[in-house]
Structures are given as structure tokens and as C-alpha cells.
Image (spheres, rainbow, N blue to C red):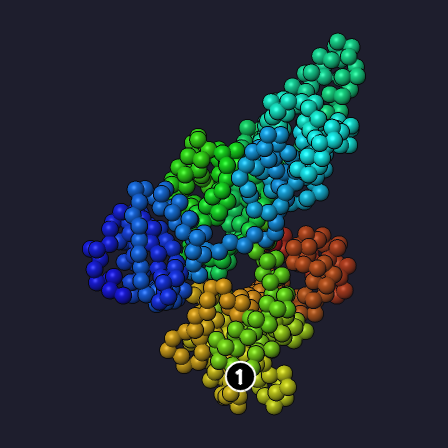
Amino acid sequence: MQISDKPKDIPTEPGVYRWRDSQDRVIYVGKAKNLRSRINSYFASELHPRTQSMVTTATSLDWVTVRTETEALQLEYAWIKEFDPNFNVRYRDDKSYPYLAISTGEEFPRAFVYRGDKRKGVTYFGPYVQAWAIRDSLDHLLRVFPVRSCTSGVYRNAKASGRPCLLAHIDRCSAPCVGRVSADEHREVVNSLMSFMSGNSKAIMADLAKRMQSASTAQDYEQASVLRDDLAALERVQEKSVVVLPDDTFADVVGLHHDDLQSAVQVFSVRGGRIVGQRGFFMENAVDATSESLMTDALMHIYATATKEEIPGEVLVSHEPESAVSLAELLGVIRQTQISVRVPARGDKRLLMETVLNNAGQSLGLHKTKRSADLVTRSKALAEMQEAIGLPDAPLRIECIDVSHISGSNVVASLVVFEDGIPKKKDYRQFIIDDPRDDTASIAQVVSRRFKDHDEVRPYRPNLLVIDGGLPQVNAAAKALEASGIGNMHVIGLAKRMEEIWKPGAKYPIILPRNSEALFMLQRVRDEAHRFAISLHRNRRSKGMVDSRLDDIAGLGPIKKRALLAHFGSLKKISQASQDQLQEVAGIGPSQAAEIWQFLDQDNSQDSAVNTATGEIIES
């Protein structure tokens, strides 16, 4: 490709570009405010490995200029949907959520619970987490808004026979099939239902309460009781949604949590201050994904097929979108009013955003756990790993080593074991590093200790040893294995920043596709080793803090320290104890109890002084 030699041929207007491979398949679609600047960036000396992989796979490039960035945003999304490029973001809903749907395109619209892709001529409310909840709500709503809810076949049969169904007899349907209401009258009831579901519940319930009071005043107690029951039915519907914001809030709250390969998105729909819907989906990240670009992709996916009624006046996001102004303009055109797209900075909206983000993080973690537990997926991952790394057999036993420390202090390491892609926790080990110099020396020490008696460990020798780190760390592990008499073990390093795989002495890393099951499993193994190492490091650091405080008390030896900790459970409870309570510990007399109490009381007073001066909270 000679594009980089002719930069003047590339326009500087906004536009959308497509990279193609040798078979003329579109492998990546991107947009830019300035096409020349964006395309030239792909020929920089240093690129992310996945971006480098895309560029080296491509053999041709074409582009289309547009007038504005908003048009570029629309065209980019349309092309991604049309060509489904390998290197672009891919969407995967974590489940099929139920909606309350109203077929507004029919002469007599129907209300029903629906799952699946959205269709034209249908207005959707939700989605909802539980199908039973929306079915129960619909049953209450039909009491107040008796719209048609039967299928087309039932409607035709009732119309042909001239006999309405059971719902009409129990006042859950206005029976348009037999002409009890006209099309205009039925449409008016449908509009009232849609208004209630859109968040205009306060005005509708106030009207019901006013009519109930008028009927009661006129001594029409039968009608008043009906209106009272209608009002109670709507109140039960509202009880299923939580009030989180003021009554005039109509917003969607969109939270994004991602790692290098995947993203989880959670959307909470707030109408009239209440959470009336929630949904989530996952994305396989694009090659050059950032938090800003991923949020843009997520919002396009959420609102690409949305109707005017489905778009709120305010969209609260966890990350500023890459094209916030263009997105707001695009959504405003659909809704026909001005739209706000922003990150909440404080208050109740910020607190709600933190809840949505927490849900997104938990959703991504659960998605990874379910994915790793699937037998077919695990088998595929091990086969891909064997082929990519060049192993003679599938790595049925994988061991991974990770080192944890803070500024070189309390250096520890973990070793986790996965068999058939599943953690084998009884084989996990933890190491305290003696005389650590750096990460490579620590890795070498752990490997040497793990395989010290290699003849004895031969039956449990891993098919693959994974090191959390890059080329220096994996080279250190390989030398330690050779020194231990094991020179033929397969060892690799997984560098976290770029997620590349390094083999000992390699000049270039192995780059697996971003949607590779093998890479996903290696990440899970590495993350588990990191978690296990961190847990040991925290325990040692906390124990060291306790020991250092008690060591400063004269005459308090290791036996009495252990007795104090066994009796009270923590240093904080020891410092809160009275002198009489301290004397209850075996070996602690009145004079020593007074000395311990005085020392810890003075220590706490100093902490309090520091807190007052800095405004910080310091726990004992």
C-alpha cells in the first residue's frame, strides 16, 4: 500500500473509511473529522498490536466524505451493520429482555408482552428484567386502560362470530371486535396507556382521584368504588418501579465497564423519576477502542432504531462520548427537541450512575465466569492455545505465576493451577520472596522453588507455565527452569498492557485475535493469579502494621502479642479495650496492662490530631 506516500490525495473533510483485505472483504470501518489526519495515524511507527494486525491484514482502503460529523456517525454505524467487520465492535445482548409492546400501526392497537428484535409500527416500553413483573403490570393496566390484548387470530374469530372473549366480560377489554367502541375511542384509550407508560402517571392518577371524589360527592358510590380500584391498580403498577430522582426527570442512565477485549453496558430508563426499565449487553471491543469511542458505539447501538417516544430528553453517561455533540444532534433530530448527553458530576444522578456502573462491572464478571465454565468453549480455547503457541498437545494443566508488591516492600507471589480450563484451588500456592531485587529475580526465585525437586513434581508438571509479564520476565523463568534441570517445559509471558504473548528469546510477540477464546482463557488465568497474590500481599501488609505497633511496647514479647490478638481479634479492638479488659489476657498483669493502654491511648490521640489537621479519616 502506497497511501502513506501520497497524503495530499486524502481529503481533510469529515468522512468514513473502510479497510479491505486481499479478498475485498471489509475488515474495519472508521469515521473521522479529518480523514487525512486519521488515516495517516495508521502509518505511525508504533501502533497497538491489534491495530498493527488490522493494518497488516488490509490491502486496500476507500473512503466517503460527508458534510458533518453527525452524518459520519450515521454512515459508520450503517456500514458496520452491513459488513460486520472483524476488527470493529460487536454487540452481544446478555439476554432477551421482555418489553410491553403496543402495535400502534394497527387500526385497533394491541398491548402485549414481547421479546426479540423491534419491528416497525410497534411502540415499546421497557425493557424489564422479569417477564412475570410486566405481565402482572399489564393485567393491572388493562383494568384502567381496557385496550385490546388478544392475538390477531382470536380477534378475527371474535369479530366473525360476534361474540367477545372472556376479557371483555371481566372489563379487561373494551371489545372493539364486536363494535362496542369505535376506532377513535379505542385509540384514545391506547394513547392514555402510552402516556402513563411514558411517565405521565402523576397527571393521570390525579385525574382519577378527582373523578373519584366527584362521584363520591354526587353519591355515586358504585362509580367511586370502581375509580378507587382503578387508582389502586395503577399504584400497584408503580410500586414495581423505584423512585430515584425528582418527578420531572426523564432520562436514560448508561454505564460502561470494559477491559481490553470486552465491554459491558447497562442502561437504566428513568421516567417521571422512577426506574421503569433496565437492560444490558456486551461488546467485543474494536481494535483501537477507548472509553470514549466505546461509549459512542454503545449509544449508537441503543438508539439506532429508537423512535421519538423512546428517546428521553437527557442521556446520562459514565464516560464522555467521543462524538458527544454529534450524538446529541442526531438524537435531537429523531426526538425533534434538544437532547442533553453528559456525565453527571454530583448529586442523586451521580449516585445512580455509580449503581449502574456497579451493575455493569458485575455483569462483565459474571459473563466471563459463565463463558469460562462452558465445556465447548473451554475445549475450543485449549485447541486455539495449542495451535497459537505451538504446543504438541492441548495444555490440559496450566500454571500461572504473578508477583505482587508495593514499591518493593512485602513482595509475595502466587501460583494458580487450571486443569481443563477450570481452577484447581487445592493446588494453589503462595510464596514470600526472600531478598527481592526486582520482578525478574522474584519470578526466577518462585520458579526455582516450584520446580526444586523436578523428579518429584514430574507427574504434576504443567503443560504450560504462564508468567504475568513480558519478555524479561519470561526469559528469567526459562533460565530458572533450565537451572532446575527442566529445559523442555513450555513457558510464555502474558503482558497485560498490550495482551501480547511472549515466548523465551522471541523477537516479536504472538498476537491473538481480540475475540479469541484462547486469549480469554489466558486472561482469566492471569487475573486469578493476580487476585490470589494480592490477597496474600494485603494480609502480610496488614499483619506487618499490627506487629510494628505492638513491637514498640516495651516488654511485650511475641507470645503475649499473639495472646492479645487471639483474645481481641484486631489491633483496633485492643486499642479500644480498658485496662481491666487487658488484664483478662493470660500473662498480662496490672502494670503491663496500664503500659499497653497508655501507649495505645497516646497513639490514638496522635492519630486524632492528624485527622483534625488534615481532614482525613485514619483507621487504627
- Judged from this view, the residue extending furthest toward the front is 160
Compared to residue 407, the image places residue 141 above or below, namely above
The answer to whether any part of residue 162 appears in the image is yes
Q: Nearer the viewer, residue 582 or 531?
A: 531
Q: What crowding class fits label 1: few (fewer than 14 Cα within 10 Å), some (14-19), or many (20 or more)?
A: few
Question: Label 1 belongs to which residue?
Answer: 392
Left or right position of 181 against 435: right
Q: Nearer the viewer, residue 563 or 359?
A: 359
SS category of the residue bearing label 1: loop
Task: Give the quadrant of the C terminus.
Answer: bottom right
- Judged from this view, the residue extending furthest toward the top is 218
Compared to residue 44, the image places residue 64 above or below, namely above
The answer to whether any part of residue 192 appears in the image is no
Question: Which residue shows up at 25% across the image and 49% down it?
Answer: 12
Residue 341 x %, y % = 44, 39
Left or right position of 327 against 97: left
Q: Quadrant of residue 175?
A: top right
Residue 211 x %, y % = 69, 16
Question: Which residue shows up at 53% across the image and 39% down it?
Answer: 120
Question: Which residue shows up at 53% across the image and 50% down it?
Answer: 265
Residue 404 x %, y % = 52, 68
Q: Quadrant of residue 381?
A: bottom right
Left or right position of 476 against 166: left
Residue 152 x %, y % = 66, 37
Q: Nearer the viewer, residue 299 or 336?
A: 336
Q: Quadrant of residue 213?
A: top right
Task: Give the quadrant of the N terminus.
Answer: bottom left
Amino acid carrying label 1: it is Pro
Q: Nearer the viewer, residue 150 or 222?
A: 150
Compared to residue 287, the image places residue 277 above or below, namely above
